[in-house]
Structure formats: structure tokens, C-alpha cells
Amino acid sequence: MDRRNLISPANISHNAGLISSALNSVLNPNTSELSLIHIKRRAMATDFEVSFPLGTKDAVLMAEECLDLINMLENQLSVYIEKSEMVRINQNAAKSPVKVEPHLFNLLQKAKHLSHETSRGFDITSGKLVKLWGFFKGPKRVPSDSEISNILSTFGSESLILDLDKKSVFFNKPEIEINLGAIGKGFALDRVKKHIINKFGISSFMIHGGKSSIVCGDSPIDQPKGWPIAINHPWQPNHRIAIIFLKNRALGISAATYNNFEFNGIKYGHILNPITGYPAKGVATCVVAAPDATSADALSTAFFVLGINAAIQYCENHKETGILILPENEKEQVLVVGNLVVEF
Amino acid sequence: MAMDLTAEQKEQGKSNFQNVSQELSRRGFLKGLSAGAGVAAITPAVYFGYKSMEGNPVRAALIGCGDEGGILVGAHNPEYLKFTAICDIRPYNRDRIMEGDPKVPLRPGFKKLYGAESKDIKVFTDYKKVLEDKSIEAVVIATPLCNHARIAIDAMKAGKHVLCEKLMAWNVSQCKEMIKVSKETQKILSIGHQRHYSMLYSHAFEVLKSGVIGDVKHIRALWHRNNSWPFVADAAPKFPIAKEYPAPKYRDGWYPPIYQVDHDELKEQSKMFGFKSVEELVRWRLYNETGGGLMAELGSHQLDACSIFLGKVHPLSVSGVGGKIFYGTDRNDRDSDDSVFVTFEFPGPNHPKGMNQGSDKDDIVVVTYSSLNTNGFEQYGECVMGSRGTMIVEAEQSVMLYNEKDPSKKSTDPKSTSISVTTTPGNKPVLDASSTWGPGGGPSAVGGGAAAATGAGTPVSRGYKEEMEDFAYKIRVWDKSSKAEVDMPRCHGRVAMADAIIALTSNIAMKKKQRIDFKESWFDPTSAEVPDGDTVPRIPAV
């Protein structure tokens, strides 16, 4: 368990010594400025932005092509778009196996695998649960215990029957509705990353979707540690928790910040625990670094739901993953575990 | 329309519209609503006041088997109206109406629709021969505009009921003549402004009437298309393209290639039907003497919609700018304007000429309309702007409803690409990560469940099917009973003439660069008065 540290944000300097990676690459005061060009467009209900070091040839043209790809993927994945492939799958896959576009098939496969790996902390088949709480189109509501317990048995990624040869999906439970909300942005970023590297031959770039899914290429010149990404406190935006450095890696951030609501004095967050059917509790922010954005996106949701112990255990078996968790309880310490280059 | 809305915002708008119309329906303000759960849907037939077909389907002939004819064939219901004959002077069209258009599923062709029975369809080239056929009860006319009046009038005089495509006629005098002949011959004359048979528009009107979006002072309607992309010929065309005519430079439905079969058969004959050349016949929409330009082809539908929204009222004035500012010699050249921008004053509900016939002369609704050929960013549609909300009808397929933004609320971002440059000191964060889920919507664009797909599956009927069903139904009732008791189809001559007057007067205003006030007498079929500039047609009505 290398680079595992337990840190209190209020007492960072005392613990800083424990963070080997951060200490080994202390900010070089002579580092030159970093100028970037950012190209941004609305997609998937948020802003997607492609950034290149300023001076990268044809940056805007390349970015436009990337953003077009994201728009295209939105048309495929969004359940808000009537004719999307995802809608078609949700409508038909309980009746008979539905043939799926190969990339999307891979995504479903990966989502199922990640659900298994996280013991269902993350589950794309919980669309009906999301709706039950009104997180889909509103109005938000607190369902009754029996409504929740009834719905829990109607989904589960193990009931996604994926036929590798036929590239088809079948819902073994008729009520299943796939919800790619916790993985779609990451998937889109991975596709764009591949496009940039393979088609344009560009290695230094950063792309993000809504600042909560980020994927980076090689370090910009004079930034040997990687692309510096600030992690802020979810309720106190001016309070910086950490800076994470990313190099050829991706970051997923989950926090129940915006889409929550209050009922009878209790606050309910928008990230639902697919095991209990209730909003996840205990974590304020969960940040996951992984080799690909699809995994980072899904895992940040999973460990937001499952909490610190599950995160520690996961990183023991997945050395490529790094996790930062800020607990909801301000008295608890920030957890940094696994492979993460972080500075406080 | 709705260019700055995300997919979620659009869904939210659709859901808002449904919520409001369901509530109105529940309270008895709406006759019935097809979309949305929880409300017993009624069929368009009930809504539009016609019933199941009594007796045999009407035996009809399709005169004019081009692009629009193909759409009508695709939409018709043979339980009401059965095509027993087709007529077109172009061999290309006669072939396509039977075989279908492989690239356009909406034009499936008779072979697919009628199967073996399609062999029984009689094929004509001269419409006069169709009119001699006693077995044919009605004609559906989808020819170039310049021939509408002549064929419709001849048909009614020959004892046929007529459903004629819009625009009703090439000029207002012809419209009046058609109405006159309909009366004299006691034949039904219905015009194909399909929005009169669209449940979507009917409900949009009901919701508007309820006042939920406050005072409506502006409607913005548009149909923008980008016909500036290079023309690419079919790799393996079914018919070779004739070399005698300028080839399309741009991909433009109004400037199609001219096929050798049409040239060979019609190079002499086209003149018999009033056309100067095969090119004028095939590309009739481009010429002022054969077509009516963008206002007739596209604008008339949408001004029709605006009239519907305001309670089927007539506009007060029009002015506008139009021009052929993109196409030219060797570049899909034409007579007609390739860009039109017109502004109308319509009477608001409380205006003396408005829906409620009030006394407020200042209750004016300004309607702007544009149609152009060099940008297709926005989907076509109509945007009704009220003081408390906005209703957007997009592509005849969806209605979205939004409250006016509370000044204290954050506005939404337009769907546009922004470019910025930042400079940060070395090793300082280049991005502040966060977990933004956006206001209101769902977990994210790709989150949620399948029920978001409101009305997914079959597209909303644009009204073609219903317009033909009602036409056929009315014929059956008409022929059996005392005619005075039968309602005319919803878009009968007088209604459609108003749409033609709007479109044609707009063209005159742009041509003369004048503001024109509409006169009520123009809209009166018994009055001989027509707009100044209602020029003499090359192809006479009778």
C-alpha cells in the first residue's frame, strides 16, 4: 500500500512529509508560465472543454472535431434524446437481445465488470431507482421504504446478459433501465483521447466534461509532474483541499453538491446507493485517478457510495488506481490512497 | 428553433408542455391529448370531427407524383382514400411513385404499400384523361404551383372532389376562381396545409389560449436550410442525368438533376403543359412564373401556423427584404429569392380584428419570418414569445414550453463553442475540478431512464394522413346528404386563400420594397379585389 496517507486538511503541513510523491517534486520556483488554449461547448448537460498548450497547431480545428465526437456520443448515449441507441436498448432489451454498437457494447461490458469489482457500489442498471427519487426530471421526492425495497430487486448489473460474439445485450430482469450518468462522460473522454492521439498524433492535452471528469495526456512543457488540477471543498469553493497532478491519466470527481434537496430537515444527495436504494452518505467528495476516464468516472461514484474502507481495499488490488476522499464529517481526515500524485 | 437548448432543456420543455396541457385537459379545457401518460388519448379523427369511413374508400387519382406526391402517398390511409390512378408527365416521377424512393422512407411507393394490387393503378400522363375516367371520384393535386388552379377547376367541373396541395394557387385571383367553381359545382375543395390537421398544433393553440405564457406580442418563425454544400451525383443512378441542362453545383432539393428519361420524353411536350422547358418543369420552384418561392413553399405553412396560434386571424400588414443573394449564374441559378425576411403585424386577441374582437387597436403581435439557404443551424419551427413564457414548436414534431426566466435565476448557456486562452504560473492548477450536475435536470445527459423518451417510437403525425382521411370522410357524407349540413374540411378554400394571400403579398412587398396593408376584401372570395401586383399568370386558371 504505497503512498497511502491519512491527512487532515486543517493540519496539512504536519502530514505533508508522508506524501512522498509530493515532496519529491516540490514546486520549482523557476517553472515558467503555462499558457493554454481552451475550446468549450455544451454537451451532456454540461460544458466539455478541450485544452492544448498554446501554440499547438490547428488546436481549434482539432478541438471542434473532438467536441463533434462528444455531441455524436451524446446522441447515442443520452436517454433524453428520443432516438438514441440507449433509449432503443432500454425499450427493447427486456424483450429480446438487442445488437449494440461495438464501442457501446464495450462500455456496457466494462460497466458490468466495474459493478462486480465494486460489489455494486456502482450500477448502471438502476435507472428506475433514479426516477423513483425524481432525480431524472423531477419533482424530487422521498419514496416510501416499501417503494424502495420493491425496486431494489428489479435491477442489478448481473442481469445484463452480454453476448460477446453477437455484441448484443439482453435484460434478464424486465424492469431494468440503464443509466449511464455515472460513466458516460468518462467514456466520451476516453474516446476523444484516443482520437487525439491516434488521428492527430498530439500527446499533450487535457479534456474535461463539467470539470468532474478529466483526462490528460503528456505533461505540458516545464510541467514534469503533470497537469495540476485543483480539488476544492464541495461546500466551500474557495477552500482548496489539494492539487492533483495528472499525466496520461484520468480523474473522476463525485460530490453530492448541487442536485440535492431537503425534506423534513434531512438533506438528500443525488448519488444513490444501489444496494440500499437511499442517497449515499458519509463522503463529501470522492476523487479517483485511473488510467482511463471511464473507470475513474465509475469508481468515483462507487467509492462515494461505499466509503473509505472499500476504497482502501480496492486500491490494494488495483495498484493503478489512486483515491482521495474527503469525509462528510469535518472531524474526519482526508484519505489519500493508492497511486496519486498530490500536493496540499 | 430553440438553438440554445440542451437535450435536457428540450425534454424539460416538452414535459412542461405536457404538464400544462394535461392540466387543461383535466379541467375540461382541452378536448383530449394524445401525448403523455394519465390522459385518455383521443384519436385525431374524433378531435378533428370525422369518423370511421362509411362505405368504400374514395377512389382517387394522384395528379403530380413528385416529391410531395410521394409524401402524400406514404401518409395516406387506404381505408379512407384509395389511389386508383396516378398521373404525371415525367417518366421519372411515374417510376418513383410506384417503386418508392430508397433514400426517403416517407416515400415508400405504391408497390410497397399496395403490393400486387399496385398493378391495378391506372397510369396517365394527361390529367384531362384522368378527369374523363368516371370511376375516379376525387383528385389529389401535387403539381407545380402554376397548374394548381387549372387542374383543380377542370377537375371540379368534371365532377371530381379536389384536395390540392398548397400553395392554393399562383395568384389570389386564381384562388377566388377556385372557390367560385367549388360552389358552382358543389364539389369539395380542400387545400393541403397539413398543420390544420396536426394534433400538435391544435394542442399548442389550446395551451396558448389558456394564457399560460402571458401576453403574446411576438412570434418568430423560420425555416432555414443549408443548400450550399457541393452537389454529389449518385454513384450508380437509376436514370442517367441529361447533359443538356446545367448540372446542380449545390445540393439543393429545388435544383435537382434532370434525368435523360424526362428530357427525351418531354423536350417538346413540356410546352404543351405550359412550361418553357423541361428545366422549368422539373425546377419549377425556382421560377416566379411557375412557383412562388420560399414564401409559398415554406413560409405559407408557418404563417398559417402563426394565424392558427392567434385564432385564425388575418394579418394587418407586411414588409420585408428578400433577394437572390447567394445563387447565380452557373451556381443553381434561379428567379426566386434565396433569402426572405418578412415582418407582419397581426391583430392580438383584443384587437378589433383579433380573436376576441376587442377594442384595443394597440394589441398587435409582430410576427417575423425568415427562410434562407445558407445556414441550417436552427431546426425549423415557430417560437411564440409571451410575457410569462415561451412556446416553441419544432419541426412539426415537438412543442416545448418554458416560463420566462425569473430575473433572479441563472440563465442557460447557448449551445456554442467558446474559445479562451489562459496563462497560469507554472505548477499552479489549470483547472478547478468540481462535481457539477447542472441545475434542475437529471444526474447528467446520459443519466436517468428510458421514460425520458416521451412519445418515442412513432413520430408525431404532421397531419397529412388526417387531412386525406377527413377529405375522404367528407366526400362520403357530402355525396349522401344535403350538402349544406356538411362541414367543409378544415382547410377549405377560404382558409387556404388567406394563407396564399399572406405568402403572395409578402412576395409583392419584398419586390416593391413597400409595406403593404392587407385589405379585408382580399380575403373575401366574393369580392373581386386582390392585392396590387397580383399579376397575370402565364398559365391561365381556365
Image (cartoon, coloured by chain):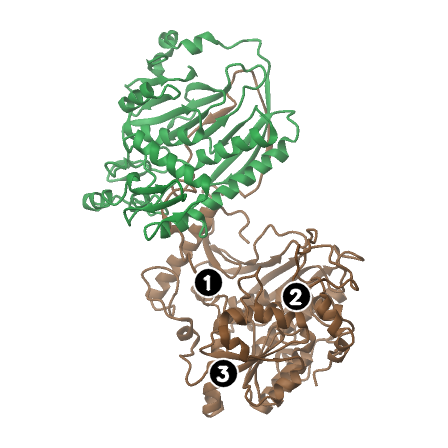
Chain colours: A green, B brown
Image quarter (top left, top right, bottom left or bottom right) of the N terminus of chain A: top left
Q: Residue B336's spot in the image, x, y percent? A: 73, 64
Residue B79 placement (x, y as % from top left):
44, 78
Q: Residue at x 43, y 63 (%)?
A: B207
Q: Secondary structure at mark 3?
A: strand
Kindly identify which numbered label has been placed on residue B58: 3
Q: Visible in this render: residue B180?
A: no
Residue drawn at x 42%, y 81% is B53
Task: Tell me which chain the residue with mark 1 is part of.
Answer: B
Residue annotated with mark 1: B460
Q: Which dot, 1 or 3, sits closer to the camera?
A: 3
* Cα distance in 3D space between marks 2 and 3: 32 Å
Q: Are marks 2 and 3 on the same chain?
A: yes
| Residue B239 versus residue B490 in the image, above or below | above
Between marks 2 and 3 in the image, the one whose residue lies nearer the viewer: 3
Which quadrant would residue B380 be assigned to in this image?
bottom right
How far apart are labels 1 and 3 at the CA level?
A: 25 Å
Q: Are marks 2 and 3 in contact (CB under 8 Å)?
A: no
Mark in the foreground, 2 or 1: 1
The type of residue carrying mark 3 is: Val
The C terminus of chain A lies in which quarter of the figure? top left
- Camera-nearest residue between A253 and B382: A253
Near-viewer residue (A203 or B369):
A203
Instruction: Tell me whether the residue at label 1 lies in contact with that at label 3, contact meaning CB atoms closer than 8 angstroms.
Output: no
Q: Earlier in the sequence, mark 2 or mark 1?
A: 2
The disc numbered 3 marks a residue on which chain?
B
Farthest residue in the bottom direction? B482
